Amino acid sequence: MSYCPLDATSGFIQLTGPIPPHALQQISQNRYPIQTSFTPRTTPASLSNFHIADTSNNICFYRNKKYTLVDIQICQPLHTGYTLPGVTEQSSAEMILSFTGSDDPNGLLISLPIFNTGAVKNDEYLSQVIHQPNVTKITTLDMMMNQTSFGYRTCFEMVNGSGKVTPTSLYILVFPDGIHLSNSNYTLLTNGTVPRFGIPPALRNAEQTVQRYTITDGAKKSTLVSSDGFVYTIPISTCDTDFLNKIEYFLQPPPIKSESSTKVVASCGSTPLYQPSQYKCVPFDQNKNLNEQNGLIYVTPGTSNQTLQQLITKPNKPIQDTTIGGYSIVELETIIGASVVGIVVSIIVGVAAYQFAKDD
């Protein structure tokens, strides 16, 4: 038998008490927790028995580890108390995305509270799931995550057919601003009732889960198991040091990996950015392949222009103090004198690579 350690977080954390602003500041991280890469859709996802069928080719990355979406559930509020200072609304349901991975942690859950407040916000995805409109622009899952989030690491126990208990690690993200539905859409989504969240079979090897346990002589002992993937919850006070030690608050929303890694965008001016495969290393001659414009030195392989010394001593263009990519001219001259193929090209902002990419 192997349970989650007693000195480690296990089960789902529910917060009690309002979150003090100073405590929120202490756990704040000025970064994003994950990257997402969700496949665009041509039709809205469908809903059946409180599960949304939208898991095909949808992935996220946590600490450079890949996790695959395997389940989306509409369920009862699970992560209660994750309310930002000044907010009094309480969620009526929750949308939980479950991802499975092959590393530690073994899985990742994304929680989006659903509010039945009448005032709509961030509701486009679920609205399309509910009404199945015939539209050209289909909202994807990642659009709901353009907000701050809480995160914590936890553990739950699986029980196989022989009664063997195995711990499994999870990382949980809760997006507190969630989804705000109109009263009519909330009724259509839930029919007035929602089930309890269960760990999907893909995250528990289709095994049972420990739903309740006792501690005897310093050791856990299961008293109730669930074939539906139910897991116990634990309360943590927002005034307790456990809140500061176990919960993180991410100030930046997750970037969308599919857009940030594949879209060709324009930089300042008219120079476009290209994919790594479009760049090439080329020979560089410091006596030929330089040019100066407006006090800046450019590398121009294949084009005979001026030498570095000519540029430095050019009349009426004093550029001795000019910096290029963080290097002074003196430093640059030293680098160029000691460098060969390709190295200087990368130091001077990759302009040479752009020139050849454009010619292609």
Image (cartoon, rainbow, N blue to C red):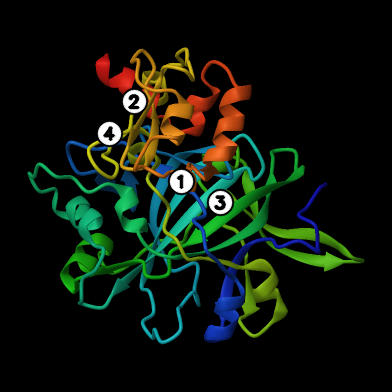
How far from the left and from the top, in percent, is residue 345?
Answer: 47, 25
Q: Residue at x 26, y 21 (%)?
A: 358
Q: Residue at x 7, y 44 (%)?
A: 134
Task: Decide: few, some or many residues near mark 1? Use Cα within 10 Å; few <14, some 14-19, many ≥20.
Answer: some
Asked if the residue under mark 3 is in contact with the one under mark 2, i.e. CB atoms within 8 Å, the reply is no
Task: Decide: few, some or many residues near mark 2? Use Cα within 10 Å; few <14, some 14-19, many ≥20.
Answer: some
Q: What's the CA distance linking mark 3 and mark 4?
A: 50 Å
* Relative vertical location of residue 239 with respect to residue 247 in this rendering, above or below: below
- Quadrant in which residue 160 is drawn: top right
Q: Sequence-wise, which precedes: disc 2 or disc 4? A: 4
Asked if the residue under mark 4 is in contact with the one under mark 2, i.e. CB atoms within 8 Å, the reply is yes
Q: Sequence-wise, which precedes: disc 2 or disc 1? A: 1
* Residue type (three-letter) at the residue carrying disc 4: Pro
How far from the left and from the top, in percent, is residue 314?
Answer: 39, 35
Q: Which mark is residue 272?
A: 4
To which residue does mark 1 refer? 322
- Quadrant in which residue 252 is drawn: bottom left
Decide which of 351, 62 is in the foreground and name it: 351
Which structural element holds mark 4? loop
Please indicate, yes or no, whether residue 349 appears anywhere in the rendered image. no
Q: What's the CA distance linking mark 2 and mark 4?
A: 8 Å
Task: Decide: few, some or many residues near mark 3? Use Cα within 10 Å; few <14, some 14-19, many ≥20.
Answer: many
What is the tally of numbered marks visible in this picture?
4
Which of the two marks, 3 or 4, is nearer to us in this view? 4
Which of the two marks, 2 or 1, is nearer to us in this view? 1
To which residue does mark 2 refer? 354
Q: Sequence-wise, which precedes: disc 2 or disc 3? A: 3
* Residue type (three-letter) at the residue carrying disc 1: Thr
Decide which of 347, 186 is in the foreground and name it: 347
